[in-house]
């Protein structure tokens, strides 16, 4: 099966843009599904230098978390082409009032690694989606980096030995590791656990989860927390 997928991808690369029928995002070979629930689908996008995706369809709003520095070309089907310099750690959000059909070409010398979080229609505004953004900004290590009516995004940076103390996720939250690291995770009422993270690892927290994180490694640990309003 993997052979036929690879063959299809290779042949499609040489077709004119107009000759390739777009595929749903979950059928695009360089967008393997990493995690899903009723609120989000998380895709682990990895494009080696010189490679490209198929034309694929984005139907829903989404968040991108860049995990590498890279140079890419974004090409919409039958439309604009844009060259972009991607920076590690940058977070972007895209509204999708209409479907987007595009492909991404890696025109640089380094891999393009991106965690794409698709926000599903079931992620509706709920009574606990407070507009107060102070919950995590008052916790050591967290910085607010992006906010709109759909999401709120915080960056977490923990130096070796640093802890967040206990904080509460008021909203459903997906955490994405940007760097590797060793972290002690303690959820209120549960036994403390140690975890090794690598870039792109994710963790889902339901609203109301109260927990603390401590960097028990020897290097700075960085992550992005995406709250769904």
Image (tube, helix red, strand yellow):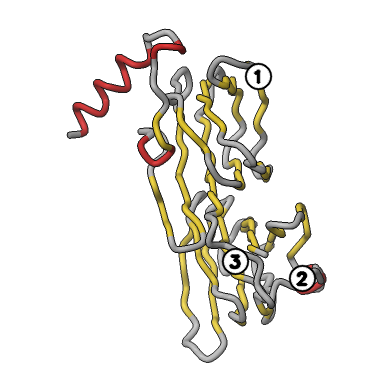
Sequence order check: which comes first, mark 3 or mark 2?
A: 2
Find residue 140 and name its label: 2
Closer to the observer: label 2 or label 1?
1
**Considering only vertical position in the picture, is 225 above or below 4?**
below
Find residue 169 and name its label: none
Sequence order check: which comes first, mark 2 or mark 1?
A: 1
Q: Describe residue 185's horizontal placement relative to residue 2 as left or right.
A: right
Pointer 1: residues within 10 angstroms few (<14), some, or many (20+)? some
**Are circles 2 and 1 on residues that touch, CB within 8 Å?**
no
Give me the residue at 39% from left, 31% from top.
Answer: 23
Pointer 2: residues within 10 angstroms few (<14), some, or many (20+)? some
Give me the residue at 47% from left, 78% from top.
Answer: 193
Q: What element carries label 1?
A: strand
- Residue on which the image places disc 3: 173
Closer to the observer: label 3 or label 2?
3
Q: Distance between the residues labelled 2 and 1?
A: 37 Å
Looking at this view, is 191 or 219 the one in front?
191
Find residue 83 and name its label: 1
Q: Is mark 2 on a helix, strand or loop?
A: loop
**Considering only vertical position in the picture, is 2 above or below 177?**
above
Q: Where is residue 87 in the image (x, y as percent from the top left)?
A: 67, 35
In which image quadrant can residue 225 be found? bottom right
**Are circles 3 and 1 on residues that touch, CB within 8 Å?**
no
């Amino acid at each position: 099966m993997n052979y036929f997928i690879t063959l299809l991808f290779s042949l499609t690369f040489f077709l004119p843009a107009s000759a390739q029928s777009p595929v749903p995002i979950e059928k695009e070979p360089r967008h393997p599904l990493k995690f899903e629930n009723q609120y989000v689908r998380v895709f682990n996008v990895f494009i080696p230098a010189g490679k490209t995706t198929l034309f694929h369809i984005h139907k829903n709003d989404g968040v991108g978390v860049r995990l590498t520095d890279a140079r890419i070309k974004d090409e919409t089907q039958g439309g604009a082409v844009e060259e972009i310099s991607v920076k590690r750690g940058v977070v972007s959000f895209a509204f999708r009032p209409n479907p987007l059909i595009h492909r991404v070409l890696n025109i640089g010398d380094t891999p393009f690694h991106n965690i794409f979080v698709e926000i599903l229609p079931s992620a509706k505004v709920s009574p606990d989606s407070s507009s107060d953004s102070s919950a995590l900004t008052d916790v050591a290590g967290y910085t607010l980096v992006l906010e709109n009516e759909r999401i709120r995004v915080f960056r977490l940076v923990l130096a070796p030995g640093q802890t967040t103390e206990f904080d509460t996720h008021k909203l459903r939250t997906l955490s994405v590791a940007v760097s590797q690291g060793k972290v002690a995770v303690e959820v209120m009422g549960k036994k403390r656990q140690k975890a090794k993270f690598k870039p792109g690892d994710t963790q889902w927290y339901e609203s109301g989860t109260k927990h603390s994180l401590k960097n028990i490694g020897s290097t700075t640990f960085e992550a992005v927390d995406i709250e769904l309003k």
